[in-house]
Image (cartoon, rainbow, N blue to C red):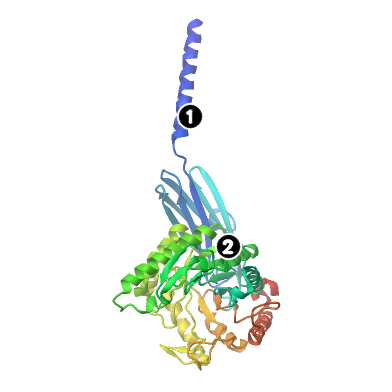
Amino acid sequence: MNGLVAILAFAGAVAAMASLVGAVQSASAPKPAYRVGFTAVPPGPVTDKVRVELRLGLRNTGKTPVKARILFHADRRIPSRLIAEQTITLPAGSSSMVSAWWPTQGKVGSHRLLCRVECAGSTRDIAWPIEVIACPTRSLPYFQGAWIDGYGGMDAATLGAEAVEKELRRGVDAMHRLGVRVLIYTYPEWYGKFYYPSKLEFFDRDIQATARGSSCIADAVGAVMDQAEKNGQHVIVGLGRNGDLHLLWEFDRPDWQERNKHAIEVAQKVAAELWGRYGRRKSFYGWYLTHEMNDLARSAAYYDPVARFCKGLAREKPVLIAPAGTPIWTTEAIRGTSVDIFAPQDAVGAGYMPYVYTYDPAKRIAELDRIYAGYSRVFAGSDKHLWTDLEIWEMDGKSGYSNSYPPTMDRVRQQIAAQAPHVDVLTAYTYFGFMQHPGAAPIERDARAIKLYGDYVAYLKELPPRMRPPAFR
């Protein structure tokens, strides 16, 4: 009996020792850790004539490799609703993106796009609600996106930060009522000025002076981002022109490589600072590379390193550019770039014809259907997104390329009709200055901008109920 007791005591001691060693090993071994982000492009609502991209960004924040299984479903996590499945291995400290495409044809109604991540012994589920609307055109026939410049045309030095930020918020609310779900903030910095509290300083080549973060009067980026989050809107944040307005138009200058290197460095610093300030916002949807291109293959020398840097901050966030009115590109060049969304300028404002400003919008409008049909063909098979930058301004040319003002709604109707059949999303450049909502309090009230807003509201009410923004159904 005593021998049996001794054996049991010894076995217990061994077990306790093993348990202790295991606990020590468990405590000392690094635990797998990871972060995920999920984005749908376009964010919705969408028509029944597009493909929605589901973008899952995964970052391994631990010190050991992790293996992850990613599954995308529509509405229910059952085999018949599976969109795509992929398994990846992420080294320590690395990140990656898994993408899947969901065609909307035959799927009219409300849906939930589901993403499940099985990683390191845990499961995370994320959902993206989206509405699919039956529509005769590829995009909905109204503006789902709108661009915002600087302080929205307001004199911040006169009004003060509180008044400017309040008016920006009211404008964001007005755009939300009109059905705008994506806000594109163009210039966090511009000609030596910053529109958010920046700590950066750099030499601006265009004005031959130093751009200083201390020039910020009001946090325009923060106000837009915060109000958009309250409304469930999405914000694409620009990086400014980085002190070189004509960078992607002057490739033949002998100092171009030096200028490009400087522009990339500044863009990366701006992106890192913006991400540090606003990256946790749910409204932070993606990035806008503000430099405008004409030749994509040559412009990739700037776009690709900046886009890769931005995606290193969050893989799932898309990168957008707005090409000029005569883009030189091929399907191969589009497919090969790190840019995700292309919103070519429709170039109607100044009546742009190939390399000439005619200041006759009708000339450009007459060519829009042909031009955008060509854009659509070159994007086919690229797995990139084609939106449009529709200009809601014009100028008479009496003072050259300056003094823009709001157009008539009849002209805007023609632009919408020509572009909606060929793109996924219509965006309007720009809201502030060319539309004024009831109760707006800018420095100067513009009767043409007030009328354009009212006529646009009337246009929305004329659409079939199913195709109107929710506030007008």
Q: Earlier in the sequence, mark 1 or mark 2?
A: 1
For discs 1 and 2, the disc positioned in front in the rendered view: 2
Q: State whether residue 5 is above or below residue 222.
A: above
In-front residue for pair 184/152 = 152
| Residue 191 visible in rendering | yes
Dot 1 lies on which element?
Answer: helix
The residue labelled by disc 1 is 23
In-front residue for pair 48/26 = 26
In-front residue for pair 331/312 = 312
Q: Residues within 10 Å of mark 1 (few under 14, many from 20)?
A: few
Q: Position of residue 38 (x, y in %)?
A: 53, 58
Q: Which mark, by number, is residue 58?
A: none
Q: Residue at x 51, y 66 (%)?
A: 214
Dot 2 lies on which element?
Answer: loop
In-front residue for pair 264/15 = 264
| Residue 336 visible in rendering | no
Q: Give the spatial CA distance, label 1 vs label 2.
A: 42 Å
Q: Position of residue 167 (x, y in %)?
A: 65, 72
Q: Identify which amino acid the numbered label 1 is placed on.
A: Ala
Q: Position of residue 247 (x, y in %)?
A: 38, 75
Q: Residue at x 56, y 51 (%)?
A: 125
The residue labelled by disc 2 is 283
Q: Identify which amino acid the numbered label 2 is placed on.
A: Ser
Direction from residue 241 to residue 158 in the image, left or right: right
Q: Residues within 10 Å of mark 2 (few under 14, many from 20)?
A: many
Residue farthest along the top direction in this orientation: 2
Residue farthest along the left direction in this orientation: 254
**Would you identify the image quadrant in which residue 326 lies?**
bottom left
Q: Position of residue 87 (x, y in %)?
A: 44, 51
